[in-house]
Amino acid sequence: MEKVTILGSTGSIGRNTLEVVDLLSQRFKVVGLAAGRNLALLYKQAEKFKPEIIALEREEDAAKFKQNCKKPYPQIIFGTKGVEEAARYFKNDIVVSAITGIKGLRPTMAAVEAGKRVALANKESMVTAGFLLRQAADKNGAEIIPVDSEHSAIFQCLAKERSQDVKKVILTASGGPFFQLSRQEMKLKSLDDALKHPRWNMGKKVTIDSATMMNKGLELLEAQSLFCLEPQQLDVVVHPQSIVHSLVEMKDGSVLAQLSITDMKIPIQYALTYPERCESPLPALDLKAVKLLEFMEADQEKFPLLRLAFLALQKDRCFSVALNAANEIAVEAFLNKEIKLIDIFEIVDETINSSVRTNIETLEDIFLIDRETRKRARNLIRQRI
Ligand code: MG
């Protein structure tokens, strides 16, 4: 049995992972769960999967959880340290890193340093600390297998290719709910509008990032780090059907792509079973029903965060850390209805123009830039409301 711990078990990726593990219960066993505040769901998950270790974000939730726990009693821990402990739990073979935001970085690093296979859904850790994670993975014999559908597609396309033969990696983007709108029309869009994604069912942060196309921006930076690519080797194309999950252009002119129905259980399962593939009960891709696959240019003027991400590919690492931090704060303010959707663009742009520059050598350097940038972004937001 391969033992799995899921960080972020009550989120969208976490729930999908548990469905996959449940289907492949002959092969995988859940030993650890880490979650934020959705205790009701965590109880159900714990009851069904009987993990040995459970990490909660807050101490008071851990105490509450403990009181209502049923046999066999799991070990219950809390806080960042608790989540890190769950990540490096000695029984883990695979750690699914699915906590959203930079919060996911420390536990991801803990799993990498413990030499685990990390099924990585937390893109912010790769965006901010990709090179440190890769270094630590090499040193400790850890594997980082992407879960994000685009990166899973690229990973699959590259499986048998030599890196010197790769010309370009092209990430596909659904375009989100506002792709067809003008900037003027986007101004009128509310939080509820932004939370309606046309193709994927995801957590709130990722859904808003999709509406601003920052999600694709983060994915560009994630791809650069994961696959060691030069800035000019990366591109984005809008593909509203979300069937082609990304493409790789080789130097001989061949273009490889991975296609599937739009369901995260496919890349999750692949990250767990790689290099093998297992049967999936999901419906097959029916190309005759899909009929049409469209591809179009992503408008970087209309979606300035995507432009900033392309810029970040060329800039130093501090820029990516600041871009991520400013975006996290702006999205949080939008979710709290403190600012409008298009204010996110301005806040992020203004914040990173004056962000801290330092040499990044450790995670602490990253958290320093992150904290300073957040402060600056919060000040800008405060000035507006
Ligand atoms: Mg994605």
Image (cartoon, rainbow, N blue to C red):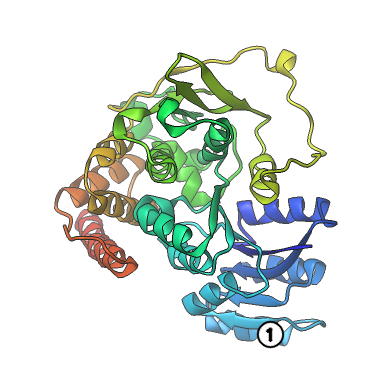
Residue 51 spot, x, y in % from top left? 74, 72
Residue 274 spot, x, y in % from top left? 67, 46
Residue placed farthest to the right in the image?
26
Compared with 308, 109 (above or below) is below
- In depth, the one of 331 and 382 nearer the eye is 331
Residue 94 spot, x, y in % from top left? 64, 60
Label 1 packing within 10 angstroms: few (<14), some (14-19), many (20+): some
Compared with 53, 187 (above or below) is above
Q: Is residue 35 visible?
A: yes
Q: Is residue 284 left or right of residue 101?
A: right
Residue 326 spot, x, y in % from top left? 29, 53
Q: Residue at x 57, y 32 (%)?
A: 160
Q: Is residue 117 left or right of residue 329?
A: right
- In depth, the one of 44 and 114 nearer the eye is 114
Q: How many marks?
A: 1
Q: Which residue is mark 1?
A: 66
Q: Residue at x 49, y 38 (%)?
A: 193
Q: Is residue 341 left or right of residue 266?
A: left
**Tag 1: residue type?**
Lys
User: Which image quadrant is residue 185 in?
Assistant: top left
- In depth, the one of 165 and 246 nearer the eye is 165
Q: Residue at x 53, y 66 (%)?
A: 111
User: Which image quadrant is residue 63 in?
Assistant: bottom right
